[in-house]
Amino acid sequence: MTLAEVKKKIESKEALLAVIGLGYVGLPVAASFARAGFDVLGVDLLTERVEKINRGENPIEGEEPGMADLLKTVATPGKLHADSDYGALRDRDVILIAVETPVDSDHKPHYQALISALEAMAPNLKSGALVIIESTIAPGTMRNLVQVTLEERSGKQAGLDFFLGNCPERVMPGKLLANLRTLDRVVGGMSPETAETMVTLYKKIVDGELDATECITAELVKTVENAYRDVQIAFANEVALICEAVGGDVWKVRELVNKSPGRNMLLPGAGVGGHCIPKDPWLLASAVDGKGVHLRLIPAARAVNDGMPYHILELLKKGFAEMGKELKGSKILVMGYAYLENSDDTRNSPSAVLVNELEKSGAEAVIHDPFVEEYQGDLLEKAKGCDAAMLMVKHDKYKEIAFPDLRDSLNKGLLIDGRRLYDAAKALNSDIKLYQLGIGMDLNSN
């Protein structure tokens, strides 16, 4: 099968599609193509997830507008069917890969899931198939790892026996389907013809602009855009630390700074989590290992953002010091364990870092999160007997808390707000001692 034939099958929606990895990226992609009229096979090694999808059930918790209804509509053979057997890929014309690409503890790419997917797929790769990597990868990975692995394991040659490209995802939990449909995408192909064929495919589900380019450019764009955001968040976090030290209010400062033309200071917070921002800057940085480029800004930004959960702990210690209370032996309510508000996504959760540090300090952490099954339950019941509460995630449900009820549940009326969710005056009226990120001690003391 030639690339022109693949393109023709895509245009007529006769192309058989497959998506490897049915998580936050792969599942909405697979469901969207099924809704567009394609026969889509989803492949995932988690049998429980596969079974749920085939029953038309959404395995993603949290608020995902439209996702549950879409799965009920498309989860049927001929539209979307899930399987754990890579052998089912043999008749697929287009295969998209959306698996995790984390970094190791030394900040180097950890591509085991990607390599495993490529190795399992290669013997089942149809002649002439188009393979697209949606996962975020370090610049150079398409040529140096993806192409090499597929050629070695399949015995086929890229550009002749199969075609290769990458189209990095741009989705966020809570907005998966909306992001997928509306955001612009960078479409990288090993050849211009491959990129244009990929554009034809993505036009079926993407309303945003599709920019055809080379694989290396697509790899760079995705890692650069997340490194850029990480640096901007780090700046906001560092300003928050300055404001605390000099007696200012970072939230008021940010508001007034952003009135100046061309300024867009981001929000500070208790930490940066998720699958993308904590690791994509390191993927970008890894591309220049051994190339004589000495990076300073990207590692510094990572250090600032990684340090925020530790700073939130310092606010707790300051609050306890004011009360003459020891952290060791205390019981602390941690509010929120997902990395993002109104989501169940706990990948690289700042709360996980905080909980670990609390336990190392001899404190007991009581975790609550309305979207993470393990930590669900009545918040006020969990607060009973706790010496302090720490707000780590800005879930909507936490906005509904009545301060008097929280105060009555806590042994000590101490609340650490790492997301500036609460009003200081209301806390004061309820006899709650409130410490907020980015606000100086004089302003924090109420």
Image (cartoon, rainbow, N blue to C red):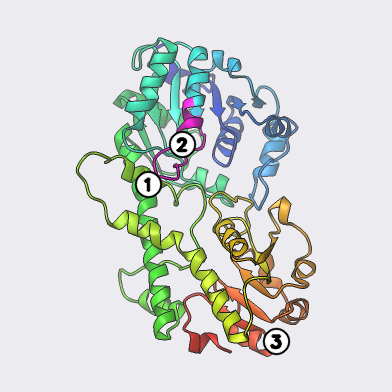
Tell me where residue 28 appears, x and y as whole percent. Answer: 58, 39
Label 2 sits on residue: 135
Foreground mark, 2 or 1, reads 1
Dot 2 amino acid type: Ser
Q: Rounded to the nearest whole Å, what is the CA distance between mark 3 and mark 1?
A: 45 Å
Residue 168 position (above or below residue 142): below
| 77 or 405: nearer the viewer | 405
- Which label lies toward us, 3 or 1? 1
Q: Residue at x 44, y 18 (%)?
A: 6
Residue 364: percent from left, percent from top? 68, 65
Q: Any magenta on residue 102?
A: yes
Marks 3/2: CA–CA distance: 48 Å
Query: Picture coordinates of residue 92 (x, y %)?
Result: 54, 17
Q: Looking at the image, which is closer to me, 209 or 393?
A: 393
Give the magenta range. 97-115
Label 3 element class: loop
* Tag of residue 430: 3
